[in-house]
């Protein structure tokens, strides 16, 4: 039990008494600490004007303070643009590089760019265009001043930036805490399951990249949450010779290297899943638990034959992801259960895996259609296939008619069968006809990939 949230802010220990843990970090910084270098632009984690840096485990990670709840940073170390200092009062080298490259115009977005640049410089990134653009994908400059910003990032990549200081020992929380009787932060799996049984209506909070919008944009913060981030079993990542297991509360940033090693096609796909700020907080478990029909990861996991480990005080059960999504925003998760982990079998010999995301813009956008496909070929014949899509129905779903047609009659039949599997709707992202055509075209792209693996079939790769 704890009365006050506490964390390090710009190397100073702060206690936060008498304030709702559902307050966003951005609102607290600006309204309660007077640190107005951090800005609000979109209030939904897209524009990057609110970027600050979390310093944890010897790393610096850029995050969106507009959608992070104050309770989430308890025990953490936070740095804002006001906390950057060079030697003897001089500007920090990152600030100097931005100034010398004329990488600022109106200045509204500049603090966010500076903090993303600090995380970039601290992460050992190289000065190649791909790394720089990936680091900047979560920061929007409305003055279109990207050329000098990219130039500044090129200089920053070569800087020797001091490592983050160690977190003060006093920040460590050896036991579960609760703030304002509404924000529960367990430290063990048993404590988590007790809380889940006692508060079945509380929202499960991992990274807040979705739920944080309730507080930031809707201004209707949740009444109760159970924060999952500190439970070791939910943050664990493990591999064996035959499968990969990712804890439901492990961040995308933490899981990416493991996922890409096992499934190389995910390298490009994951780089388009939000921004670095989003991937530093967002989790696969959260993407599954929200049950959005346009979530990026569920089609991938369906194609990879993923299974979930669900736990409660009643015990543990395994469920194929195929059986988890019931209908729109409804899942097979019982009120007293949580998702502990997601497991995916490694690819067998002769299996190929590919995935695609189609959206209105390349970065920081919601899928119009997402597709993922695992195909096993032996002696020149397709003997097994799993084809999954998002954005085509009320839930992420496999294209079972197309799978059967592919095995029986080949790709032309599979493409023709897409209309049997899905009856999509019209919305502002795309019409039903457009979605059906896109899904068919993605299967045609898969056919070409399998026929000629060296052939370039993506515009961005040309």
Image (cartoon, helix red, strand yellow):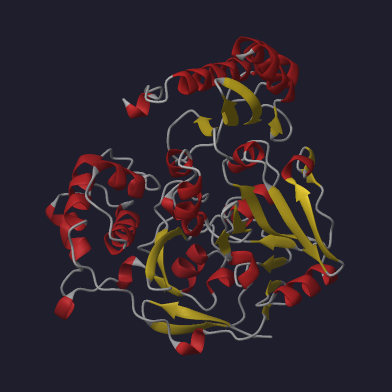
Q: How many marks?
A: 0
**Residue closest to the far left:** 100
Q: Quadrant of the C terminus?
A: top left
Q: Is residue 248 visible?
A: yes
- Give the quadrant of residue 416: top right
When the figure is inspected, residue 84 is found, relative to residue 237, above or below; the finding is below
Q: From the viewer's perspective, tell me whether residue 324 is left or right of residue 75.
A: right
Q: Residue furthest bottom?
A: 170
Residue 181 lies in what quarter of the image? Answer: bottom right
Locate residue 159 relative to residue 189 in the image: left or right: left
Q: Position of residue 107 (x, y in %)?
A: 27, 52
Residue 82, above or below 324: below
Q: Which quadrant would the N terminus be assigned to in this image?
A: bottom right
**Residue 422 in view of the camera:** no
- What residue appears at the point 63 percent right and 17 percent down from the top-left corner? 436
Residue in the foreground of this view, choosing between 413 and 324: 413
Residue that appears at 84% across and 71% down: 198
| Nearer to us in this view, 390 or 433 | 390
Left or right: residue 260 versus residue 323 is left
Counting from the top left corner in percent of width and height, residue 401 is at: 74, 20
- The structure residue drawn at horizontal position 65% and vertical position 15%, both measured from the top left corner, is 414
- Farthest residue to the front: give it: 379
């Amino acid at each position: 039990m704890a009365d006050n949230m506490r964390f390090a802010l710009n190397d100073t220990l702060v206690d936060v008494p008498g304030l709702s843990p559902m307050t966003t970090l951005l609102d607290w910084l600006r309204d309660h600490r007077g640190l107005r270098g951090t800005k609000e632009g979109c209030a939904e984690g897209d524009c990057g004007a609110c970027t600050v840096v979390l310093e944890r485990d010897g790393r610096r990670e850029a995050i969106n303070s507009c959608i992070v709840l104050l309770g989430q940073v308890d025990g953490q170390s936070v740095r804002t643009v006001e906390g950057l200092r060079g030697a003897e009062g001089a500007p920090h080298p990152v600030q100097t590089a931005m100034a010398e490259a004329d990488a600022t115009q109106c200045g509204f977005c500049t603090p966010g760019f500076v903090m993303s640049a600090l995380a970039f410089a601290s992460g050992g990134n190289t000065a190649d265009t791909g790394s720089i653009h990936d680091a900047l994908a979560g920061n929007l400059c409305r003055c279109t001043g990207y050329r000098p910003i990219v130039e500044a990032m090129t200089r920053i990549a070569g800087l020797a930036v001091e490592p983050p200081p160690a977190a003060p020992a006093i920040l460590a929380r050896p036991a579960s805490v609760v703030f304002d009787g509404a924000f529960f932060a367990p430290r063990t799996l048993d404590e988590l399951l007790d809380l889940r049984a006692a508060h079945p209506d509380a929202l499960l909070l991992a990274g807040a990249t979705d739920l944080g919008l309730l507080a930031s944009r809707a201004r209707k913060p949740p009444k109760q949450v159970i924060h999952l981030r500190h439970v070791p079993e939910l943050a664990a990542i493990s591999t064996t010779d035959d499968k990969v297991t990712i804890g439901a509360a492990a961040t995308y940033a933490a899981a990416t290297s493991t996922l890409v090693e096992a499934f190389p096609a995910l390298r490009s796909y994951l780089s388009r899943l939000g921004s670095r700020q989003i991937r530093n907080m967002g989790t696969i478990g959260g993407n599954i638990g929200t049950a959005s029909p346009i979530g990026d990861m569920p089609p991938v996991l369906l194609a990879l034959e993923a299974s979930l480990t669900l736990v409660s005080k009643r015990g543990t059960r395994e469920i194929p992801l195929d059986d988890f999504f019931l209908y729109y925003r409804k899942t097979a998760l019982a009120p007293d259960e949580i998702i502990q982990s997601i497991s995916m079998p490694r690819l067998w010999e002769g299996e190929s895996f590919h995935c695609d995301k189609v959206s209105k813009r390349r970065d920081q956008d919601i899928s119009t259609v997402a597709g993922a496909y695992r195909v096993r070929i032996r002696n020149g014949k397709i003997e097994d296939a799993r084809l999954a899509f998002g954005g085509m129905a009320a839930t992420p779903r496999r294209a079972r008619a197309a799978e059967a047609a592919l095995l029986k009659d080949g790709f032309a039949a599979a493409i023709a069968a897409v209309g049997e599997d899905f009856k999509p709707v019209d919305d502002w992202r795309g019409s039903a006809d457009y979605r059906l055509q896109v899904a068919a075209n993605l299967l045609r792209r898969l056919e070409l990939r399998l026929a000629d693996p060296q052939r370039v079939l993506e515009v961005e790769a040309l």
